[in-house]
Amino acid sequence: MGLKQSLHKMKMKYEGTKMAPAFNAIHTFLYLPNETTHNGTHVKVADDLKRTMNMVIMALVPCLLFGIFNAGYQYNLQTGEVTKALSFFSTEFWNFSNFSIGAWKVLPLVIVSYGVGLLVEFIFAVIKGHEVEEGYLVTGMLVPLIVPVDIPLWMLSVAVVFGVVIGKEVFGGTGMNILNPALTIRAFLFFAYPTWMSGDKVWVTGAVDTVGQPDAISGETILGSLAQNKGFADWSMMDQFLGFIPGSVGETSKLLIIVGALILILSKIGSWRIILSTLVGALSMGLIFNGVVEMGWIDESSKFFGLMNVVFWQHLFIGSILFGAVYMATDPVTASQTNKGKWIYGFLIGFISIMIRVFNPAYPEGVFLAILLMNVFAPTIDHYVVEGNIKKRAKRLKVKTA
């Protein structure tokens, strides 16, 4: 109570100054605003945009914690400190070095993502004289989860500045952007620094050849292996489902992503229509490719055979299609707004994701490109859905009045 009263008193000092937006951002992050409406009808609710964003962050925390553990585990697995034969419940499996190594690599990504992103948000708020917007609370958590663990921090900083300024602020800030900011940041990293975002040397810490680092570490992912027609190697379906595989920090554990999806759906923050239709689209494209292989239209000598031959439902267990469907495609600002539009929007994301995955062996994960593409077309989809509804109603009215 003392802290709350002190903040309310300090707020009076900042009212009308350029620093008011920065102070109000900290104030309202901790407590609900002490402002009330006096006129007109209004609805009393227990949440606001900050609380909604916090719910999404809570759904992401399990993926972050597991990503920290898995980053250390993959390193120790490559160096021989742990073995895959260890029992899941053994003390050696859950040794402290897995967490310490992972935390040492992942937490700086989180700190830089939030530090740089919020700094840019505060600067724009002070310059423009508006309140600090809450959109980056989720973006700041998503960014470290969708990048390789060894991405240089300066690269991440440059990408975050680009994503916040070019991907959001130039459009007017939160709620006005046409592209998902987190995916804009990832797209910038991929096209500006491709060697740090793809290939078989970036997904396990220490795999990049630098002075003092082991040479025997492989950072190859399942998608990379399949793209080279080498199969699933030693990764079992249980490894893929639980997440004990190389990959971006937060994308590997399908179990925890499903838990996050349930949190978002039950809290009515994430659209189950988009999530389900994205998965249906991915499965449909996978079935088509399986049919192509079954018909003998492509043989094992083709560079596309490895990923085409993957059983259609296994596409959901590899790569980041599930993570993208749950946390990226459902962004309420950049996704379709109509119910029918959400089905179309999600289906095309899943369909195009698997298409890019198969036909681009150099970069066999296309979900972020598919989502960014459909972000652009989401308003068009909604437009034609609304136009279609107007025509149907006009037709029904004409029949009734005839």
Image (cartoon, rainbow, N blue to C red):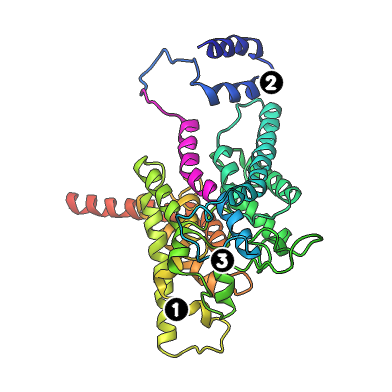
Nearer the observer: mark 2 or 3; the answer is 3
Could you tell me which secondary element the residue under label 1 belongs to?
Answer: helix
Residue 179 visible in the snapshot = no
Q: Main secondary structure of the magenta part?
A: helix
- The spot of residue 31 in percent (x, y) is 51, 21
Q: Amino acid at mark 2?
A: Met
Bounds of the magenta segment: 44-67
- The spot of residue 29 in percent (x, y) is 54, 26
**For this view, does 8 lie left or right of residue 157?**
left
Which residue sits at x=50%, y=31%?
50
Residues at discs 2 and 3 in contact (Cβ within 8 Å): no
Could you tell me which secondary element the residue under label 3 belongs to?
Answer: loop
Could you tell me which secondary element the residue under label 2 belongs to?
Answer: loop
Q: Residues within 10 Å of mark 1 (few under 14, many from 20)?
A: many
**On screen, residue 31 above or below 360:** above
Residues at discs 3 and 1 in contact (Cβ within 8 Å): no
Label placed on residue 94: none
Q: Which residue, given by chain and number where applicable, does mark 1 sit on?
A: 289
Label placed on residue 19: 2
State the count of labels: 3
Q: Amino acid at mark 1?
A: Phe
Which comes sooner in the sequence, label 1 or label 2? 2
Let me know if residue 55 is in the magenta part.
Answer: yes
Mark 2–mark 3 distance (CA, rounded to whole Å): 43 Å
Q: Which residue, given by chain and number where applicable, does mark 3 sit on?
A: 365
Which comes sooner in the sequence, label 2 or label 3? 2
Which comes sooner in the sequence, label 3 or label 1? 1
Which residue sits at x=18%, y=49%?
401
**Closest to the observer, 285 or 307:** 307
**For this view, does 235 lie left or right of residue 270?**
right
Q: Residues within 10 Å of mark 2 (few under 14, many from 20)?
A: some
